[in-house]
Image (spheres, rainbow, N blue to C red):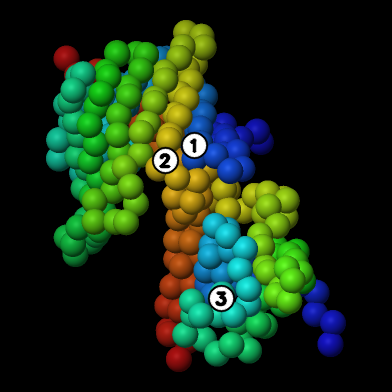
């Protein structure tokens, strides 16, 4: 079965978001990543596979070990991590603007 | 539609800037930041304390519908220059997030337009990235909860 993976599907899952957060500070092996979760190891492997397929993670051979690290280019591409933050401020500032447009100084 | 609010967060840096242009005269924009009643309206939070002066401070608190406090934040105001600048710290209470330093700059663009530039410095790159991702994580959680509510009703 050839399921097309897209980044939005990838980041919709809380475990996968947690994996991205973990790996964002340093590259890690699959074992090290799995040790941070109660989930069964094969489940974590599946998540890693999905994240790698949609290029959010990259594998790097490091001697005998495979390290996973974040692909900042892809993360930037989706900019989805920043967009909700921007949106939150945009909503706030829109409110501020509305309130002040109707502001009447108290006498 | 062009985006009025921009967030600039460079890779590998422990800072970010938020910029916004308003269809408001500078004085009104600045007032929105210094009047407790108005802050409460647009920030959606209760203002427990607000001392607009050099060496002043502030404290915000937000409660849910049941009256439980869900958010509390405070900070020290280091510099207060009317219609120009506020330098302050910001700390979310009872969270693992370290205090951040904020430089708020207000600028008049024309009689009826103004701009704010907020430059925030975090303790580390990792912390900045975590804070950046909070609304993202919360947004997804809210979406999940809503979905759960809907599914519950269908049962």
Q: Where does the N terminus of chain A fall, quadrant-wise? A: bottom right
Would you name the residue on which mark 1 appears? B15
Quarter of the image holding residue A93? top left
Q: Are marks 1 and 2 in contact (CB under 8 Å)?
A: yes
What is the chain identity of the residue bearing mark 2? B
Picture coordinates of residue A82, whole percent (x, y): 57, 48
Q: Is residue A7 above or below residue B38?
A: below
Q: Nearer the viewer, residue B93 or B19?
A: B93
Percent across and percent down for residue B21 are: 52, 24
> Is disc 1 in the same subunit as disc 2?
yes
Question: Looking at the image, which is closer to me, B73 or A37?
Answer: A37
- Residue drawn at point x = 19 percent, y = 39 percent: B59
Q: Is residue A68 left or right of residue B40?
A: right
Q: Is residue A90 visible?
A: no
The quarter of the picture where residue B54 lies is: top left
Residue position for label 3: A32
Could you tell me residue A96's position as x and y percent? 39, 32
Residue B140 vs B8, above or below: the answer is below
- The circle drawn on residue B122 is 2
Query: Dot 1 lies on which element?
Result: strand
* Residue at image coords 49%, 16%: B113
C-alpha gap between disc 3 and disc 1: 29 Å
Which label sits in the foreground, 3 or 1? 3
Q: Earlier in the sequence, mark 1 or mark 2?
A: 1
Mark 3: few/some/many CA within 10 Å (<14, 14-19, 20+): few
Instruction: State the residue at coordinates (52%, 69%).
Output: A18
User: In the displayed structure, does residue A94 sit left or right of residue A102?
Assistant: right
Residue density around tag 2, few if under 14, some if 14–19, many if 20 or more, within 10 Å: many
In terms of secondary structure, where does tag 3 sit? Answer: helix
């Amino acid at each position: 079965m050839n399921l097309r993976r897209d980044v939005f599907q990838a980041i919709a899952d809380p475990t996968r978001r947690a994996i991205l957060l973990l790996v964002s500070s340093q590259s890690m092996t699959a074992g090290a990543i799995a040790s941070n979760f109660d989930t069964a190891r094969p489940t974590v492997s599946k998540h890693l596979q999905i994240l790698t397929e949609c290029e959010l993670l990259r594998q790097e051979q490091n001697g005998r070990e495979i390290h996973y690290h974040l692909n900042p280019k892809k993360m930037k591409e989706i900019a989805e991590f920043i967009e909700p933050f921007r949106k939150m401020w945009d909503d706030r500032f829109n409110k501020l603007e509305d309130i002040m447009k109707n502001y009447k100084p108290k006498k | 539609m062009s985006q009025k609010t921009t967030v600039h967060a460079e890779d590998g840096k422990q800072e970010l800037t938020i910029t916004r242009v308003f269809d408001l005269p500078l004085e009104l924009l600045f007032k929105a930041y210094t009047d407790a009643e108005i802050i409460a309206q647009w920030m959606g939070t209760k203002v427990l304390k607000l001392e607009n002066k050099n060496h002043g401070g502030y404290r915000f608190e937000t409660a849910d519908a049941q009256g439980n406090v869900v958010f509390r934040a405070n900070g020290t105001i280091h510099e207060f220059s009317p219609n120009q600048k506020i330098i302050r710290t910001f700390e979310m209470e009872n969270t693992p997030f370290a205090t951040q330093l904020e430089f708020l700059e207000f600028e008049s663009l024309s009689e009826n337009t103004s701009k704010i530039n907020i430059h925030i410095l975090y303790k580390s790159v990792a912390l900045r990235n975590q804070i950046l991702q909070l609304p993202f994580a919360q947004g997804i959680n809210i979406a999940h909860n809503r979905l759960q509510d809907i599914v519950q009703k269908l049962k």
